[in-house]
């Protein structure tokens, strides 16, 4: 197990990788800029292939509307207004690393049960905790 500076560098590298994936997915989605109805029709085939009935898909999607207000919020996020390392240095702290390790130990039995039942390792389940780093306001 890594400790001290090595652990922080490792966490920063992992966090940077995760942030890159999130930014890439966001850029791809924005680049598409297709009308919602067109996207919905294209997604229909994927849903049907996964066992969703056509009736269920039609019933759910008929009432679904995109929330485009999120686009106004996008540009105010620090992820788009700060350099990557500045952003990470402000959000990855000793307190967050320590707290994350404590929570990982606290929930280890649950993670082990999920891994046994569903085959998903705890390292995969802990990735959303990196997203929480980005959402935390203050410390």
Image (tube, rainbow, N blue to C red):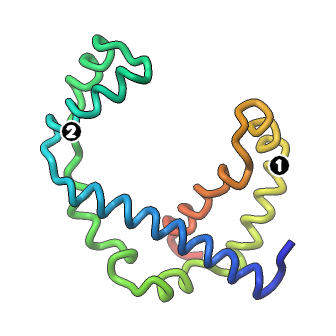
- Where is 94 relative to 37, above or below? below
Secondary structure at badge 2 equals helix
Residue 128: assigned label: none
Q: Earlier in the sequence, mark 1 or mark 2?
A: 2
Q: Residue at x 43, y 23 (%)?
A: 50
Q: Nearer the viewer, residue 19 or 100?
A: 19
Residue 134 image position (x, y, % from top left): 50, 68
Q: Give above or below for 44 relative to 83.
A: above
What residue do we see at 35% from left, 20% from top? 48
Residue positioned 28% across, 27% down in the render: 44
* C-alpha gap between disc 1 and disc 2: 39 Å
Query: For this rendering, which residue is in front, 138 or 8?
Result: 8
The answer to whether residue 3 is left or right of residue 78 is: right
Residue drawn at (62%, 57%) of the image = 127
State yes or no: discs 1 and 2 in contact (Cβ < 8 Å). Answer: no
Q: Is residue 100 above or below residue 93?
A: above
Q: Which residue is mark 2?
A: 39
- In the image: residue 78, left or right of residue 125: left
Q: Residues within 10 Å of mark 2 (few under 14, many from 20)?
A: few
Which x, y percent locates residue 85? 50, 86
Which residue is under mark 1?
A: 108
- In percent of width and height, residue 38 lies at 15, 37
Within 10 Å of disc 1 (Cα), the crowding (few <14, some 14-19, many 20+) is few
Quadrant (top left, top right, bottom left, bottom right) of the C terminus: bottom right
- 70 w.r.t. 66: above or below: below
Q: Tell me which corner region of the image, top left, top right, bottom left or bottom right, holds residue 11.
A: bottom right
């Amino acid at each position: 197990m890594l400790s001290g500076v090595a652990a922080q560098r490792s966490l920063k590298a992992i966090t940077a990788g995760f942030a890159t994936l999130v930014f890439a997915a966001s850029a791809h989605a924005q680049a598409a800029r297709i009308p919602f109805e067109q996207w919905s029709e294209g997604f229909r085939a994927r849903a049907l292939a996964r066992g969703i009935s056509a009736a269920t898909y039609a019933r759910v999607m008929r009432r679904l509307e995109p929330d485009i207000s999120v686009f106004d919020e996008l540009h105010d996020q620090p992820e788009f207004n700060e350099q990557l390392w500045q952003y990470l240095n402000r959000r990855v702290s000793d307190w967050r690393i320590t707290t994350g390790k404590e929570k990982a130990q606290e929930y280890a039995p649950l993670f082990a049960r999920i891994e046994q039942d569903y085959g998903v390792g705890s390292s995969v389940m802990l990735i959303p905790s990196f997203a929480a780093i980005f959402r935390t306001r203050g410390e």
